[in-house]
Amino acid sequence: MERDKEKYLQLLTKEYPTRQSACREIINLNAILNLPKGTEHFMSDLHGEYEAFCHIINNCSGVIKEKVGQIFEEQMSPREKNELCTLIYYPAEKLNALKEQGILVEDWYRVTLRHLITVAKYVSSKYTRSKVRKAMPEEFAYIIDELLHMQVDEDNNQIEYHRQIIDTIIHIHAADEFIIALAELIKRLAVDHLHIVGDIYDRGAHPEKIMDLLMQHHSLDIQWGNHDVLWMGAAAGVPACVATVVRNNIRYHNIQVLESGYGISLRTLVVFAGRWYQDEDIMDAAQQAISVILFKLEGQIIARHPEYQMDDRRMLEKIDYDKGTIVIEGREYPLNRKDFPTVDRQDPYRLTEEEEEVLSDLRQSFLNSGRLHQHVRFLCEKGGMYRQFNGNLLYHGCIPLDEEGNFEGIQLGDKVYKGKEYLDYADAAVRKVCLSAAAEAEEDFIFYLWAGQNSPLSGRKIKTFERMYLDDEEIKVEKRNPYYEYYHKEYICNMILREFGLFSPMSHIINGHTPVKVSKGEVPVRANGKLIIIDGGFCKAYHKETGIAGYTLIYNSHGMRLKAHEPFESIRKVLEENQDIESSTDIFETEEKRIRVRDTDIGKSIQEQIDDLQLILTDKSR
């Protein structure tokens, strides 16, 4: 270590060869440490709801609206402020709409450009000039930089200089492009870093569009959710993951994401289903056919892995096919359908030749989808099972616990994995399956992450069979890992934070996965503020259950704020009526002192650079 440090300092000396150059960098870095911390934006459980996601990204969970309100509180009417906000959210679309109304005259451009410059100046104030310049669109960077540094008390020469810049932009018909550039800069600076705490996929219609949008974002990380890892396994051709993804999207009437979004053909499955279930609607038949294939594959995995402790999920062997009943936990239940024409009663988990062909065709479609593999590579590059960021711990599902509140895990071979080590193992296993050749046991583990009660992504006993074939509501209840009882307790959350090396009293767990049922009195902040659940029901399918349409979290230099959002109607409605998402704010933690860059992870790294520069400065002074 000492030798490595010495080599590093030698390289640093070459980069800063003079005392003056080292001093200049120390002064610059010290100044950066004293800037306010950048704004972090947390979102979870997007579930394919592209339009709502797109809007919350554009309005930065209401941050833009707040800034406009603060800046123009006395100068603008509510309608004018909403109009300006919509222009920032959707500049190209709003400009087209205003053009059709004949509003885009020179005076409008002149006033609007000045308003946008004022907003851009406000949101850029917490960053270095260098960082702001790097965020600017290259084609307008010099001009924007000049305009951002206009002063209210400028002399006449400077006033005329800046007026001429704006007038020239208008006269050469570059104002539309310049407005779009300013709007994008404002949105980029309003949020410094985005966290997606899992579950981009399933239920909603367009997760692929969400992924395309995320790939354009300037700074983000992703904590994988159970639905994300399921799709990652399917992209790698894991048979049970393939079957589950197809079944989920048929069930939620989202086959367009498979066929149009990722080019995955269901033709072989549909033809097969139509042949075996002739009396049904063709897509109901396809759901039945792929479900049976899934239950067979699931039974095979469980038989190969007694360590998963999932024998009770081998359902096909529990059916009395003559009576049309099934015995679960010693009780007999009637099935709501009796036809299982492809199940061999003597060997119920064996796929027929036709089922093998259907599965093979689907696997090839997933393996050959270029767009899906591009998205999976991005998930691997930006994502993981968890993230430690600025003293907070982010993960989607749970840290498995036993009934006494101790860390629970899984035994694989001779080793038991629990706590942080369990999540690290799972992270490495997912990457191996997705990015390189993996053994069957590792592929099976990806399915366990989706379906296992002690999986850190699932954390519950998934009852797909019961939900599909039984009418008794009680038997459909999915038992959850004890984590979901213990995470209300502050000492448990502190135990989890310590497991990940986080000892600060200001550290929090930021969690997704389980919708907060506001309509039933649940609250997102738990364990005396140590744990925050930000899945408030983004997905439309959850709105009745939760009573809202999602939580997002804002963490800026003043503290943490939860934003509860009402359902989003449409982008069209925003453009036509300036109708923003209605959001309420809960400021649940305010810092006595404003948080500075020196208090962040980046700040710690900068301080190390300063310390090293001080060392070489000392050498140069001798």
Image (cartoon, helix red, strand yellow):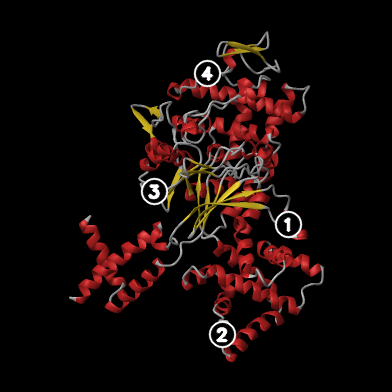
Quarter location, residue 535: top right
Q: Which amino acid does the dot numbered 1 rest on?
A: Gln
Q: Which amino acid does the dot numbered 4 rest on?
A: Asp
Q: Callout 3 environment at 10 Å: few (<14), some (14 to 19), or many (20+)? A: few
Q: For this view, does 596 lie left or right of residue 15?
A: right
Q: CA distance from mark 1 to mark 4?
A: 50 Å
Q: Callout 1 environment at 10 Å: few (<14), some (14 to 19), or many (20+)? A: some
Q: Which amino acid does the dot numbered 2 rest on?
A: Asp
Q: Which residue is mark 1?
A: 579
Q: Is residue 274 visible?
A: yes
Of marks 1 and 3, the one in the foreground: 3
Q: Residue at x 50, y 38 (%)?
A: 397
Please tell me which of labels 1 and 3 falls first in the chain. 3
Residue 473 rendering spot, x and y as whole percentages: 65, 22
Please tell me which of labels 2 and 1 falls first in the chain. 2
Q: Which residue is mark 3?
A: 505
Q: Callout 4 environment at 10 Å: few (<14), some (14 to 19), or many (20+)? A: few
Please tell me which of labels 4 and 2 falls first in the chain. 2
Q: Residue at x 22, y 75 (%)?
A: 620
